[in-house]
Image (cartoon, rainbow, N blue to C red):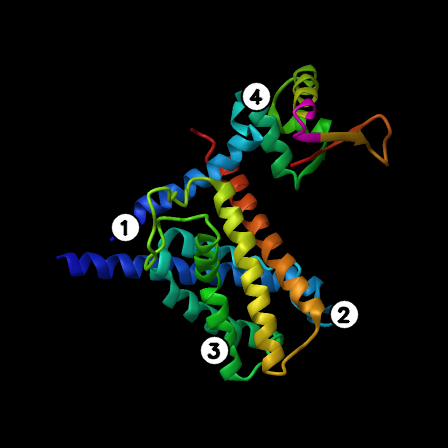
């Protein structure tokens, strides 16, 4: 019975993660990227799918990782490919997707190492003064978004440099700012929509 | 194993905290009605449209718009096509 519950939970999390990333990716590619590609693609200045990474890893933890990775690969290959912004080899799509999927988790561990001490992380020994990552506090979520953007942009820049894909420092800045802006815009838009459509409190 | 619904509830609570931060919920029903009218009008509209869509009197609308402006939720500026008319847009 418990096993069935675990499977059900895993499917719920996976479906939510896959579709939330997919929807944000489609929104990004149709409404945002089209206004940015004129001068060449060096990373989006408002990458809204980063919000899906942050929110799903923060709320569902490591259970969201497989679906997040699958969504990355699927969206990059099929949607990005159809739109013409994906010129990477398949091995690099796997590599960048792995980095992008794990960046929030790595950021959470980095923050724990720096003394934020979030109790919700698995495989980490916490002390009595550890504090919970308060999932109901938007400031905590935004802080994770900023840290994960830094981890994501830095690790992706290093990967691109080592694989001789790109060594343009502008790409690092654009990834960093784009991830933060994209997450903020998504979270604030969702909050605004919640207020506008479900005003009964 | 954590519960999926509880995690979603926490997510909605986080979004509502943002509303609290902007004090959107402290508006009266009439103020909310006008605020929604502005949101639904692509975030920018003139006062006549607000009066028409909200169904409130012009004086009530003016009073409420002043309050929303004081709360830094909206901003009003004269229309370029008709200087007698004010255009209202969201500030948040």
Residue B30, numbered circle: 4
Q: Are marks 1 and 4 on the same chain?
A: yes
Residue found 55% across the figure and 28% down from its top: B23
Q: Work out whether mark 3 precedes mark 2 in sequence or the reverse, and give the earlier one.
A: 2
Q: Are discs 2 and 1 both within one chain? A: no
Q: Chain of mark 4?
A: B
Asked whether A53 falls inside the magenta stretch, the response is: no
Residue occupied by mark 1: B2
Q: Are discs 3 and 2 less than 8 Å apart at CB? A: no
Cα–Cα gap, marks 2 and 4: 47 Å
Pinpoint residue A187: horizontal percent, then vertical percent: 53, 47
Chain ID at mark 3:
A
Q: Nearer the viewer, residue B84 or A89?
A: A89
Which residue is rendered at x = 33% and y = 61% of the image? A63
Q: Earlier in the sequence, mark 1 or mark 4?
A: 1
Disc 3, SS = helix
Task: Give the number of the mark in front: 2 or 1.
Answer: 1
Mark 3 and 1 residues: CB-CB less than 8 Å, in contact?
Answer: no
Q: Position of residue B59 (x, y in %)?
A: 69, 15
Q: Residue at x 64, y 33 (%)?
A: B38
Residue that label 3 marks = A94
């Amino acid at each position: 019975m418990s096993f069935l519950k675990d499977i059900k939970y895993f499917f719920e999390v996976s479906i939510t993660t896959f579709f939330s990333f997919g929807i944000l990716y489609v929104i990004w590619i149709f409404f945002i990227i089209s206004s940015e590609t004129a001068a060449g693609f060096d990373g989006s200045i408002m990458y809204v799918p980063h919000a899906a990474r942050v929110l799903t890893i923060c709320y569902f933890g490591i259970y969201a990782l497989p679906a997040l990775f699958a969504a990355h690969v699927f969206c990059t290959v099929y949607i990005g490919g159809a739109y013409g912004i994906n010129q990477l080899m398949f091995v690099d799509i796997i590599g960048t997707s792995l980095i992008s999927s794990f960046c929030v988790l790595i950021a959470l561990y980095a923050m724990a190492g720096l003394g934020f001490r979030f109790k919700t992380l698995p495989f980490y020994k916490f002390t009595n003064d550890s504090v919970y990552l308060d999932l109901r506090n938007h400031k905590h979520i935004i802080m994770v978004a900023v840290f994960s953007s830094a981890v994501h942009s830095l690790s992706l820049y290093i990967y691109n440099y080592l694989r001789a894909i790109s060594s343009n420092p502008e790409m690092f800045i654009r990834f960093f700012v784009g991830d933060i802006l994209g997450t903020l815009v998504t979270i604030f838009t969702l909050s605004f929509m919640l207020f506008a459509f479900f005003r009964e409190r | 194993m954590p519960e999926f619904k509880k995690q979603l509830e926490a997510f909605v609570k986080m979004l509502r905290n943002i509303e609290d931060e902007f004090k959107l919920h402290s508006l009266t029903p009439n103020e909310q009605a006008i605020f929604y009218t502005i949101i639904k009008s692509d975030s920018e509209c003139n006062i006549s449209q607000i009066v028409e869509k909200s169904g409130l009197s012009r004086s009530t609308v003016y009073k409420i718009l002043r309050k929303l402006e004081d709360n830094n939720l909206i901003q009003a500026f004269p229309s370029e096509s008709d200087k007698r008319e004010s255009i209202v847009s969201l500030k948040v």
